[in-house]
Image (tube, rainbow, N blue to C red):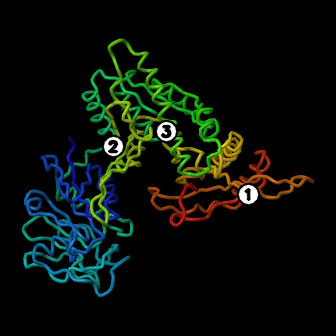
């Protein structure tokens, strides 16, 4: 097991970002709820307390007995974490005279302190808190201050316990990465050996041990997560991995053929299934978005189950597939802490829409410890085709949620052809890799147009291109007008049934990235 940092989550919106910043240092870390402590074994090198939407002064504020942790490991409290350690150690936390939110500059920095080595005076930091540490206990040393926050950072004398009132994990804290490196590498002593190559080596080895001679069945989507997971499994068990790629008729133009070909060239043991008619039949006349999703999810399970049975029949007598491979990634399984307490459920987000009880398969998830950007780095180490690694996120229900209203083969054709023109132009103009996600939306309206000397009454599509880091928030991309004009002209001239193209300039929030 790799050495690791444990992050205890008190409900901050930034907790995952702390984890990502630690991992950027090539150090493995895990997030756990404050009230469900993990085993603190010999691989743990240090602990970080996150921020929280709570005030430490609230009666129902998250509580933890941190003395045992403090005695064994270096400990860093961030925002709420810093306030909590200070208060429980005998300090005083009071409401701020004004809410301290946004950019601030450090007026005093003890650069001789190990946590703040290399941090200059006037370094910009990001504050986000309604309370402030008014007084610290006698055994606390203040090591940084701003003009409004006297206790911006402290160390408990004679210990490896630190607190910082600002958020080093956000980009607005210009030297935040240095602070985290000082703690993780210099104070905790992490070796920074958790690299994509190391992950591949250890994961393949553990998969071999976990699976032995067992067979694994896995659904592939053409996306990054399922593909990288499949390649890892393939390296571990070879042809004992049986992959299924379902064409539900709602993929992008020519995507089924292209992706299937890519998989075969990667050496994967894969079976393609054309189930267009089944999906179109079940979706006929359905326009409500959630109903569409349920129909697609249930239909996928039906198709996948039949395919799995066929694979089972082909196996030698006495051998059965016991495992279901899934491309689950770390954000899908993190048990988050909400303002109402720890969440009761873990997000279900699997490429087969969840494991049906009747399949009775054990689940293997090679990527469940990785964030999305880490999956891409591992995929690069595995030499996965860049066309797959760089692919924009694409919703599981496919074009069904990009066609507002009824799903028909004709509407699918229109969206596929228009979308292909949109995506190809983004690639040719060098914009594809600058956009986080792009797609074409079919609108359930017709508009009057003039084409040649004829009046037309045809369909409208909306183009959508957004920039984002994680999909939680997104802003529309300011594509050049001449590029938009070129795309619009090509779509109207080449896609029968469209006479008007619009561009969606709404951000998330309040809008969503997809329309349904």
Give residue 437's position: percent from left, percent from top.
54, 52
Task: Name the one closer to the observer, 66 or 2.
Answer: 66
Q: Residues within 10 Å of mark 3 (few under 14, many from 20)?
A: some
Image point 65% across, 45% down: which residue? Answer: 285
Image coordinates of residue 329 in percent, x first then y, are: 37, 45
The secondary element bearing badge 2 is classed as: loop
Residue 455 left/right relative to 216: right
Could you tell me residue 80's position as x and y percent? Answer: 24, 70
Between discs 3 and 2, the one toward the N terminus: 3
Q: Residue at x 27, y 59 (%)?
A: 342
Give the answer, above or below, for where 187 lies relative to 409.
Answer: below
Which image quadrant: the C terminus? bottom right
CA distance separating discs 1 and 2: 43 Å
Q: Name the residue tied to disc 1.
A: 485
What number of labels is visible?
A: 3
Q: Which residue is mark 2?
A: 368
Q: Quadrant of the N terminus?
A: top left
**Which residue is found at the position 31% from the left and 63% from the top?**
338
Q: Residues within 10 Å of mark 2 (few under 14, many from 20)?
A: some
Of callouts 3 and 1, the N-terminal one: 3
Between disc 3 and disc 1, the foreground one is: 3
Whichever of callouts 1 and 2 sits on the residue coming sooner in the sequence is: 2
Which SS class for mark 1? Answer: helix
Residue at horizontal 21%, vertical 49%? 4
Q: Relative to 330, does residue 355 appear above or below in the rendering? A: above
């Amino acid at each position: 097991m790799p050495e690791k940092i444990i992050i205890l989550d008190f409900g901050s919106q930034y907790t995952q970002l702390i984890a990502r910043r630690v991992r950027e240092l090539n150090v493995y870390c895990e997030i756990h709820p404050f009230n469900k402590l993990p085993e603190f074994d010999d691989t743990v090198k240090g602990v970080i307390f996150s921020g929280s939407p709570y005030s430490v002064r609230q009666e129902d504020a998250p509580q933890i007995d941190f003395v045992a942790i403090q005695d064994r490991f270096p400990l860093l409290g961030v925002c709420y974490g810093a306030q909590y350690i200070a208060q429980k150690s005998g300090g005083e936390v009071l409401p701020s005279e004004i809410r301290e939110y946004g950019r601030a500059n450090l007026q005093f920095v003890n650069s001789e302190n190990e946590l703040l080595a290399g941090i200059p005076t006037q370094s910009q930091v990001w504050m986000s808190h309604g309370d402030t540490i008014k007084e610290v206990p006698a055994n606390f040393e203040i090591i940084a201050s701003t003009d409004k926050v006297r206790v911006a950072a402290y160390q408990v004398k004679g210990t490896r316990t630190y607190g910082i009132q600002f958020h080093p994990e956000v980009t607005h804290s210009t030297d935040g990465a240095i602070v985290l490196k000082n703690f993780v590498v210099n104070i905790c002593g992490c070796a920074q050996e958790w690299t994509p190559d190391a992950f591949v080596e250890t994961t393949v080895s553990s998969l071999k041990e976990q699976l032995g001679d067992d067979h694994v069945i896995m659904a592939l989507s053409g996306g990054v997560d399922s593909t990288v997971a499949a390649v890892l499994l393939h390296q571990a068990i070879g042809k004992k991995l049986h992959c299924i790629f379902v064409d539900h008729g709602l993929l992008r133009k020519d995507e089924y053929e292209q992706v299937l070909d890519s998989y075969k060239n990667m050496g994967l043991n894969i079976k393609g299934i054309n189930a267009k008619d089944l999906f179109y039949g079940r979706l006929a006349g359905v326009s409500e978005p959630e109903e569409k999703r349920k129909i697609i999810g249930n239909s996928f399970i039906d198709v996948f189950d039949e395919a799995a049975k066929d694979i089972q029949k082909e196996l030698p007598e006495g051998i059965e597939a016991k495992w279901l491979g899934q491309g689950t990634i770390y954000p899908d399984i993190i048990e988050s802490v909400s303002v109402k307490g720890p969440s009761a459920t873990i997000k279900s987000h699997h490429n087969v829409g969840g494991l049906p009880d009747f399949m009775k398969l054990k689940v293997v998830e090679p990527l469940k410890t990785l964030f999305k950007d880490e999956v891409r780095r591992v995929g690069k180490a595995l030499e996965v085709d860049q066309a797959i690694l760089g692919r924009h996120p694409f919703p599981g229900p496919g074009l069904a949620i990009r066609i507002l209203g009824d799903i028909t083969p004709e509407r699918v054709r229109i969206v596929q052809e228009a979308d292909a023109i949109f995506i190809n132009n983004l690639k040719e103009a060098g914009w594809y890799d600058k956009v986080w996600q792009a797609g074409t939306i079919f609108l359930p309206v017709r508009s009057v147009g003039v084409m040649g000397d004829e009046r037309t009454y045809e369909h409208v599509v909306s183009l959508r291109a957004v920039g984002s880091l994680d999909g939680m928030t997104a802003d529309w991309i300011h594509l050049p007008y001449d590029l938009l004009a070129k795309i619009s002209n090509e779509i109207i001239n080449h896609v029968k049934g469209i006479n008007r193209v619009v561009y969606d300039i709404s951000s998330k929030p309040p809008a969503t990235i997809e329309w349904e």
